[in-house]
Image (spheres, rainbow, N blue to C red):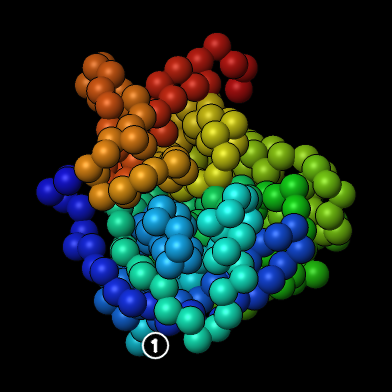
């Protein structure tokens, strides 16, 4: 295991609530006090879905309450494990292993922060946005994309954002209430959303910035979105960190089933997403991103 990885706890967690959203999406809140106290944006839990199913599922942490002792995750039902989890009533107990992984490491020298989340990759950037909203000095902007209805309450009249179109636009209610501006993107014709990729919003915002020397990008989502994010970060010379999503068996570095190629100091080496990541510099994952593409 990576010696820099945070401490991992094994707890019997009580499911406090499950909220179902369209598209077989669920927001689950589970009591796990030790995990909640040590969770950081970008970390995840390895959750038992059902006592009869031996394989756990890795789920990114979306929110954490150290005082109340719970964490929230978002998942979309895919396969029998998560289908069983979706049928689990509140009050049930499931084994929780977490928090796992090295999360985002924001740079205080770049306080203007662009957060890009796609699909079930939205939770880590929401977690980071909420964390930044509670600390002075940060200026986060959250851009969230989905091809399914968004699994959260919408703010139908989101605050204006310099550099983006000021027409009718929706945002994420929770973030807007915390003072974090947000915008949504979808190719599914969702109301209040930019009709296209979330990275198109990011590109437009970066193009219209008077300076990018104070900017940094933090992103999580499907691989094509991450590659596009790495490319636009390279074109605009903005550092970016990517939170990867990979299938994994043990989630604690033993099986190496989640290994990915990472370029460090000009050499390609294999790194485990679970404990060496899941967050990596964009240039390490996509070293050729943005090359030869007009700005």
Q: Residue at x 52, y 21 (%)?
A: 290
The residue lying furthest to the top in this view is 292
Taking the image as shown, residue 231 lies to the left or right of residue 68, namely: right
The one of 104 and 221 positioned closer to us in this rendering: 221
The answer to whether residue 60 of the structure is visible from this angle is no
Q: Residue at x 33, y 77 (%)?
A: 12
The residue lying furthest to the front in this view is 52
The one of 238 and 30 positioned closer to us in this rendering: 30
Q: Residues within 10 Å of mark 1 (few under 14, many from 20)?
A: few
The one of 49 and 149 positioned closer to us in this rendering: 49
User: What residue is disc 1 on?
Assistant: 68
Residue 7 image point, x, y percent: 19, 62
Secondary structure under the numbered disc 1 in the rendered image: loop
The residue lying furthest to the left in this view is 3
Residue 207 image point, x, y percent: 63, 36
The answer to whether residue 199 of the structure is visible from this angle is yes
């Amino acid at each position: 295991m990576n010696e820099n990885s945070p401490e991992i706890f094994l707890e019997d967690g009580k499911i406090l609530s499950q909220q179902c959203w369209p598209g077989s999406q669920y927001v689950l809140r589970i009591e796990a006090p030790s995990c909640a106290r040590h969770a950081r944006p970008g970390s995840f839990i390895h959750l038992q879905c059902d006592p009869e199913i031996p394989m756990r599922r890795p789920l990114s942490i979306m929110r954490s309450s150290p005082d109340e002792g719970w964490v929230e995750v978002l998942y979309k039902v895919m396969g029998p494990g998560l289908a069983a989890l979706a049928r689990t009533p509140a009050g049930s107990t499931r084994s929780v292993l977490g928090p796992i992984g090295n999360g985002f490491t924001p740079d205080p020298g770049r306080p203007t922060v662009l957060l890009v989340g796609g699909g079930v990759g939205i939770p880590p950037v929401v977690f980071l946005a909420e964390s930044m909203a509670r600390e002075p000095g940060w200026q986060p902007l959250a851009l969230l994309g989905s091809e399914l209805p968004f699994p959260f309450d919408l703010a139908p009249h989101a605050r204006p954002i310099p550099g983006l179109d000021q027409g009718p636009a929706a945002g994420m209610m929770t973030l807007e209430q915390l003072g974090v501006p947000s915008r949504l993107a979808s190719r599914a014709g969702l109301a209040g959303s930019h009709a296209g990729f979330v990275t198109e919003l990011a590109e437009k915002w970066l193009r219209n910035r008077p300076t990018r020397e104070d900017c940094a990008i933090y992103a999580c989502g499907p691989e094509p979105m991450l590659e596009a994010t790495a490319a636009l970060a390279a074109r605009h010379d903005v550092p970016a960190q990517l939170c990867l999503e990979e299938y994994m068996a043990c989630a604690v570095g033993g099986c190496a089933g989640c290994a990915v190629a990472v370029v460090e100091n000009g050499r390609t080496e294999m790194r485990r997403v679970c404990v060496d990541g899941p967050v990596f510099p964009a240039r390490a994952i996509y070293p050729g991103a943005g090359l030869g593409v007009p700005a």
